[in-house]
């Protein structure tokens, strides 16, 4: 049976999905199953965990069928397979059966790496499913979700969605789906705000934005809401530090286009525009005062003080006042 190159064919004999991001792993499986069922609606799908795949089980699953039915055999957490089962899988990889697609999900890392190497050696189709721990990765994910739907969203809207939803890719993907279904035209920051106001207000980045803009009352309101909804104090001090440092970096940088400054300072161009608006009223002394306030709050929430909430409130007030220091000069 003719197949596409293993690198781009979901029906390649073997698909190897490597990583720990559950949403991406599940999507890798769904893509293979959908392609198989498009070819044969009666495709038999077996989704197995290591405890269900005992020595000899794989041989039974991939044995020739009287009716030559198509099968998809999914093996989750392949890094946890027993040594004897790994031998069975490696033997199968050397001579995969026709009409059967094997999907191996592996967390990556050293455990069970021999199986990954064996799959790569036979030219398995590989899908990367890395855990997205960095905000920039999640922002890129959201942008990709909008592109996949063929819809346009502004950079500010994508950032607002990440700030509002957080690190859960399933929730981010669901939010994109909802916005695309409900909203016509380009999706902007205002739209995201209308849909996710409560969550956006609980974001640590919203606390930081209001503080560096000198909006004391709004910053304190956002801070109290964040703490009441379980946002970790350390996340808030981190966001405050990022906000103040961004002001300091941009105020000391030479003038230029956002794209040039973005390369120089390591910020996306849209953030350059936002920080430019936020830095009005700031002075070098104000930045110094704010950085000291952040450092004191950081120490306070890490056990250096009796009341982490008070430490954060004090920092927010100090930063907001520093943001208006030029006006008082």
Image (cartoon, rainbow, N blue to C red):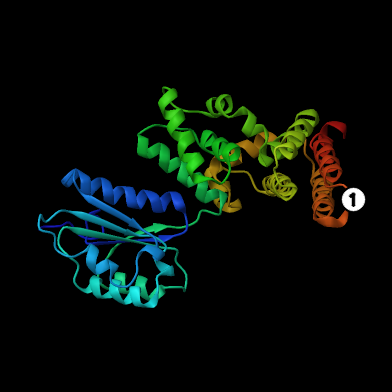
Find residue 178 and report its image quarter: top left
Q: Where in the figure is residue 266, as x and y percent of width and height?
A: 58, 52
Give 83 or 196, whichever is nearer the viewer: 83
Q: Local crowd at mark 1 within 10 Å, few (<14), some, or many (≥20)?
A: few
Is residue 127 left or right of 260 when viewed as pictured? left
State the SS at label 1: loop
Residue at the (47%, 41%) spot, across then down: 142
Residue 123 visible in the picture: no
Residue 326 on image: x %, y %: 82, 35
Residue at image position (75%, 29%) is: 218
Can you identify the residue that label 1 sits on?
306
User: Looking at this view, is 285 or 12 the one in front?
Assistant: 12
Q: Quadrant of the N terminus?
A: bottom left
- The one nearer the camera, 219 or 265, is 219
Question: In percent of the image, x 88 and y 52: which residue is there?
Answer: 305
Q: Nearer the viewer, residue 281 or 196?
A: 196
Q: Is residue 108 visible?
A: yes
Residue at 29% x, 71% y: name it.
Answer: 89
Q: Is residue 168 left or right of residue 241?
A: left
Residue 236 vertical position relative to residue 123 in the rendered view, above or below? above
């Amino acid at each position: 049976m003719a197949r596409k190159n293993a690198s781009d064919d979901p029906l390649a004999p073997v698909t190897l999905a490597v990583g720990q991001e559950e949403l991406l792993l599940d999507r890798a499986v769904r893509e293979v199953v959908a392609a198989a069922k498009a070819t044969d609606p009666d495709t038999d799908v077996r989704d197995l965990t290591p405890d269900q795949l005992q020595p000899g089980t794989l041989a039974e699953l991939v044995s020739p069928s009287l009716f030559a039915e198509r099968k998809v055999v999914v093996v989750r957490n392949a890094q946890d397979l027993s040594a004897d089962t790994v031998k069975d899988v490696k033997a199968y990889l050397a001579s995969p059966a026709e009409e059967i697609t094997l999907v191996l999900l592996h967390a990556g890392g050293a455990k069970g790496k021999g199986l990954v190497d064996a799959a790569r050696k036979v030219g398995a189709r590989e899908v990367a499913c890395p855990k997205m721990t960095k905000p920039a990765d999640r922002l890129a994910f959201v942008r990709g979700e909008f592109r996949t739907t063929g819809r346009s969203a502004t950079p500010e809207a994508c950032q607002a969605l990440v700030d509002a939803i957080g690190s859960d890719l399933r929730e981010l993907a669901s939010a994109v789906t909802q916005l695309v279904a409900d909203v016509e035209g380009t999706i902007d920051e205002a739209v995201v705000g209308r849909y996710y106001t409560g969550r956006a207000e609980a974001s640590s980045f919203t606390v930081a934005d209001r503080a560096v803009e000198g909006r004391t009352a709004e910053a304190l309101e956002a801070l109290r809401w964040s703490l009441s909804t379980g946002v970790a104090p350390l996340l808030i001090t981190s966001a405050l530090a990022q906000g103040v440092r961004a002001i300091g970096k941009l105020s000391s940088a030479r003038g230029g286009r956002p794209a040039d400054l973005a390369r120089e300072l390591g910020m996306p161009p849209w953030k350059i525009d936002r920080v430019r608006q936020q830095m009005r009223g700031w002075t070098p002394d104000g930045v110094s005062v704010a950085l000291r306030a952040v450092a004191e709050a950081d120490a306070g929430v890490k056990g250096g003080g009796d009341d982490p909430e008070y430490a954060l409130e004090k920092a927010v007030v100090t930063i907001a006042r520093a943001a208006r220091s030029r006006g008082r000069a």
